[in-house]
């Protein structure tokens, strides 16, 4: 087989569900992963890395379910070089229409000596055996030299050549620790393509971490140098400072066709929805000034800019908000709106809810419309996401009554459902938030440490919904939870309970030894 390296099409390989989930606190349950996979497929992502099947039963199940669900995109599972890892990935991928195994081993002197405690020849042997073994299960094998950018060039070339000879169809170059700079990273891709004799038989790929804020620049330099696959994540989620952000790669290629004549299959108008979904599910809010998907990415505050925009939008806008699926904030429904109008609005916003979820969402919409004078698209999106995120929760918020103000003691009377049984308590605290969280701790016996408590308003106005993010830590594991409501304390309780539910999921996961990717 010979790969068309002249093609200008760049394959988008999304690893939000694998590398993205490795961000501390970003765990997702099965339903959430399936929803994200569906959104990625709908958006036109070519390859979805759905997880690391040997890592836990939860990861196996997620890859397996996504393999059943996804029809058009390739579904990929990660594996270290051992036969057990590869067979577990192959098992999980069995139902996939287009299965891919992504296998890796570290090749840098540092990683080989200290982490793997292997000699280079032993690592080389693993490369050959892992790729050959993976090819017993699928024709689509992606091989990565972990810490590739800190690997000696001669050894890297030997390993890449061996991987291609053994049947790898894609060679992915990870900048595992985000150390590279664009010229160097592009140079490395070019060097591999030029020096490795069988390089025309594989697609070269980038996998850049963002420790120096260079992940997107490095990936694009890789594409310029001949890579035709970019591994990236929605919102740049990923280990430590994250990975190259999918939305930035795709929009840079779309906007700067003149400088970078490459195309992708991604329907960019679905970017905002995917970004919101990932942010809601993981509890990782997007910074306001984040490129493409930040709340301010298309906002024009200063008088000079506003004046220019009114005269000609091109003065300060290099891409339109509509091109990333950001439409003008619309006043939608009011308290007199009925089920049919609500359903139509949901479908316009891209939601297709089952009967129960629809009834719950409608009930919450009516309650919101009663309290809030104007209901916007953002309100509906927040409300529905909040509802969907909780579908499988074992602990549920029922009601909260708080006494607060300058005359203490501040008290919180809380009712929750735990495994379908109602529990009530009344607690005091140092302020209403503390009293509410104490009540939750009392009802659940939770001992996790609160690391982050953040509130943001979904829309303008004092009647806006509050969206609260909570981060909890327990035994070195962190989880993020989110909650929304017009009452900040109710939103806080919902967020705390959501984080606790995620902690339960995390406790059930067992980490494999020496996970390093
Ligand atoms: O960053 C890394 O090296 C990885 C590999 C598994 C591709 O995530
Ligand atoms: Zn990585």
Image (spheres, grey):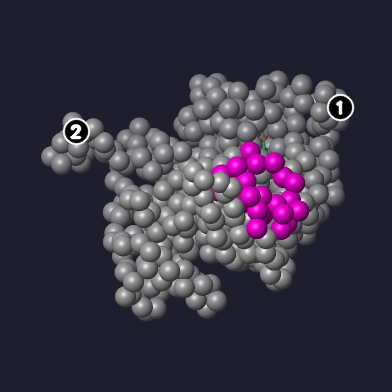
Residue 452 is labelled as none
Task: Judge from the rendering whether residue 487 lies leftward or rightward of residue 92; answer left or right.
Answer: left
Q: Secondary structure at mark 1?
A: loop
Q: Say how many tags the image has.
A: 2
* Residue plotted at (67% across, 60% down): 425
**Percent position (x, y) of residue 511?**
80, 45
The reply to whether the magenta stretch includes residue 437 is yes
- Pointer 1 residue: 117
Q: Secondary structure at mark 2?
A: helix
Assess mark 2: CB under 8 A from ligand 2?
no
Q: Quadrant of residue 316?
A: top left
Cα–Cα gap, marks 1 and 2: 61 Å
- The magenta-colored residue range is 426-451
The residue furthest left is: 311
- Depth check, front residue: 132 or 113: 113
- Pointer 2 residue: 303
């Amino acid at each position: 087989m010979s790969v068309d390296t002249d093609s200008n099409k760049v394959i988008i390989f999304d690893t939000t569900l694998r590398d993205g989930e490795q961000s501390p606190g970003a765990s997702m349950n099965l339903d959430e992963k399936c929803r994200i996979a569906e959104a990625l497929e709908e958006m036109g992502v070519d390859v979805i890395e759905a997880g690391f099947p040997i890592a836990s039963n939860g990861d196996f199940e997620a890859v397996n379910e996504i393999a059943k669900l996804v029809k058009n995109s390739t579904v990929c599972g990660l594996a270290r070089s051992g036969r057990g890892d590869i067979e577990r990935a192959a098992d999980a991928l069995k139902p996939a229409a287009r299965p891919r195994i992504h296998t890796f081993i570290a090749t840098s002197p540092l990683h080989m000596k200290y982490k793997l405690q292997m000699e280079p020849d032993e690592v080389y042997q693993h490369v050959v055996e892992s790729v050959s073994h993976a090819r017993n299960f699928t024709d689509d094998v992606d091989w990565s030299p972990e810490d590739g950018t800190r690997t000696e060039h001669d050894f890297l070339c030997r390993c890449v050549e061996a991987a291609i000879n053994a049947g790898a169809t894609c060679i992915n170059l990870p900048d595992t620790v985000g150390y590279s700079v664009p010229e160097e990273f592009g140079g490395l891709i070019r060097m591999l393509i030029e020096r490795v004799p069988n390089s025309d038989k594989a697609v070269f790929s980038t996998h850049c971490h963002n420790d120096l804020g260079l992940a997107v620049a490095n990936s694009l330099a890789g594409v310029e140098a001949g890579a035709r696959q970019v591994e990236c994540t929605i919102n740049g989620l990923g280990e430590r400072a994250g990975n190259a952000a999918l939305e930035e790669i795709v929009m840079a290629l779309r906007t700067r066709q003149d400088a970078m004549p490459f195309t992708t299959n991604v329907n960019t108008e679905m970017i905002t929805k995917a970004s919101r979904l990932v942010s809601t599910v993981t509890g990782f809010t997007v910074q306001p000034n984040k490129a493409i998907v930040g709340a301010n990415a298309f906002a024009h505050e200063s008088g000079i800019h506003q004046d220019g925009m009114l005269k000609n939008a091109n003065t300060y806008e290099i891409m339109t908000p509509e091109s990333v699926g950001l439409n003008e904030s619309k006043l939608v429904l009011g308290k007199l709106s009925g089920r049919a109008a609500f359903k139509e609005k949901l479908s316009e916003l891209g939601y297709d809810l089952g009967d129960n979820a629809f009834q719950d969402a409608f009930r919450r919409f009516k309650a919101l419309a009663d309290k809030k004078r104007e209901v916007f698209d953002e309100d509906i999106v927040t409300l529905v996401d909040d509802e969907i995120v909780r579908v499988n929760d074992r602990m549920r918020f029922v009601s909260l009554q708080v006494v607060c103000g300058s005359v203490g003691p501040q008290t919180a009377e809380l009712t929750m459902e735990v495994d379908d049984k109602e529990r009530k308590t009344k607690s005091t605290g140092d302020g209403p938030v503390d009293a509410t969280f104490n009540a939750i701790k009392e009802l659940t016996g939770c001992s996790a440490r609160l690391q982050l408590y953040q509130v943001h308003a979904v829309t303008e106005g004092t009647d806006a919904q509050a969206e609260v993010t909570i981060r909890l830590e327990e035994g070195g594991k962190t989880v993020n939870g989110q909650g929304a409501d017009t009452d900040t304390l109710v939103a806080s309780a919902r967020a705390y309970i959501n984080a606790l539910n995620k902690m339960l999921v995390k406790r059930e996961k067992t980490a494999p030894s020496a996970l390093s990717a």
